[in-house]
Image: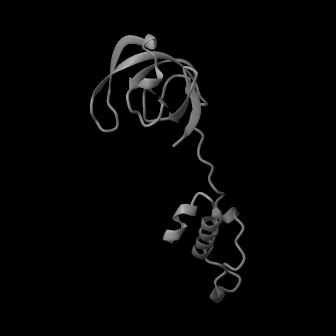
Amino acid sequence: MPVKDGTVEGQPASVLRDTGSSTVVVRRSLISDEKLTGLEERCIPIDGTIRRTPVAEVEVETPYYSGTVLAVCMEHPIYNLIIGNISGAADPQPASLPPPLAQQEVPEGTVPPDTGAIATADAVATAVVEQQHQTTTRLKPTRSFF
């Protein structure tokens, strides 16, 4: 998920860009009562329930949107600020992916002995995945399971 750092009313906040949402959601504890508009909006979160939530006018600074927005206030959203598909919201940046296998360097010693100089795509793919698994730090806690 595209989560970045930002601010809500000058306070640090974790920000999610949610392309499946049609509104802005903010954690209620970040909003002073003076920012509430007196309006309520009905929201249907992912669990399918219908909730009545107060609306606030808030100042946000994020990589996805900066400025004043009307936001629904929830007690326990999954992130401090969720930017939905509002006018002016930037698209989330795609995660950086490794190049296709055809463009990757084949690690030494990955050619199966019975095929000589021609490696099968499965052997190369397996070798590349194994090499990346051993060198990446993000997988370190799970290595003991393999």
The count of marks equals 0
Q: Residue at x 63, y 49 (%)?
A: 96
Of the pair 89 and 76, the residue shown nearer to us = 76
Of the pair 11 and 43, the residue shown nearer to us = 11
Q: Residue at x 67, y 65 (%)?
A: 102
With respect to residue 109, does 70 lie above or below? above
Q: Residue at x 66, y 57 (%)?
A: 99
**How far across and how far down the image is residue 104, in percent?**
69, 64
With respect to residue 69, does 44 lie above or below? below
Identify the image quadrant of residue 110: bottom right
> Relative to 136, is 16 on the left or the right?
left
**How far across and how far down the image is residue 89, in percent?**
55, 27
Q: Residue at x 59, y 34 (%)?
A: 5
Residue 90 appears in the rendering: no
> Relative to 88, is 115 on the left or the right?
right
With respect to residue 19, does 129 lie above or below? below
Of the pair 89 and 118, the residue shown nearer to us = 89
